[in-house]
Image (tube, rainbow, N blue to C red):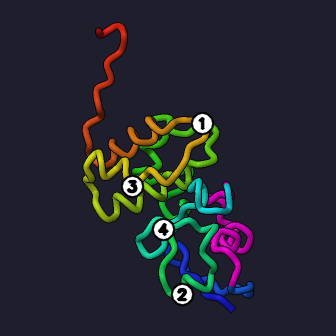
Amino acid sequence: MITLNVNGTPHTLDIDPSTPLLYALRNDLKLHGAKFGCGLGQCGACTVIVDGEATFSCLVPVSAIGARPVRTLEGLGSAAHPGALQNAFIKHQAAQCGYCIAGMVMRAQALLDKNPHPSEQELRDHMEPNLCRCGTHMRILAAVRDVAGIAQPHIETKAQR
């Protein structure tokens, strides 16, 4: 038996201790925010927060979690009452296909939990491990900047030159 504390609630699961956290979240707890992307910790679609750290849940066996708290997208808000970061992603239309967005939100939330007002470079460095195949990185960064109170960079258009 494995006990996981997910979004503030303890869950006792009868699963193999080597089961990746991602599978326990999706298959056993029916929390579908984190997605299976690559299974190699290279894309970030499966990112959750474990004990305050952005973590690729596809790589971590449930036996390695122990008593550390796990936070998923579902722990930030709901469709009816989204959290601040989720609202910013909506406002900035940061999702295109939406596959990477839960991982992006969770990686950003881990940063903002530790440092509510990161520098532009800290933001970019922290978000780098997560990939968006649709190319909405600039809108994702804009959403995080909005919540963090970081000024949006001015982008000069051809018409302004």
Count neighbours of disc 4 (C-alpha within 10 A) and say few if under 14, some if 14 to 19, many if 20 or more: many
Q: Which numbered marker is on residue 64?
A: none
In x, y percent, where is residue 13?
69, 85
The Cα–Cα distance between marks 4 and 2, rounded to whole angstroms, is 14 Å
- Residue hosting label 3: 126
- Residue hosting label 4: 49
**Kind of residue indicated by mark 4:** Ile
Residue 113 sits inside the magenta stretch: no
Residue span colored magenta? 18-37
**Kind of residue indicated by mark 2:** Gly
117, 76: nearer the viewer: 117
Q: Is residue 78 left or right of residue 26?
A: left
Count neighbours of disc 2 (C-alpha within 10 A) and say few if under 14, some if 14 to 19, many if 20 or more: few
The nearer-to-camera label among 2 and 3 is 3
In x, y percent, where is residue 55?
51, 67
Mark with earlier residue (1, 3): 3
Q: Residue at horizontal 25%, vertical 37%?
A: 151
Q: Is residue 105 above or below residue 56?
A: above
Mark with earlier residue (3, 4): 4
Please give the count of numbered marks on the rendered protein. 4
Residue 20 sits inside the magenta stretch: yes
Count neighbours of disc 1 (C-alpha within 10 A) and say few if under 14, some if 14 to 19, many if 20 or more: few
- Residue hosting label 1: 134
The Cα–Cα distance between marks 1 and 4, rounded to whole angstroms, is 24 Å
User: Is residue 83 in view?
Assistant: yes
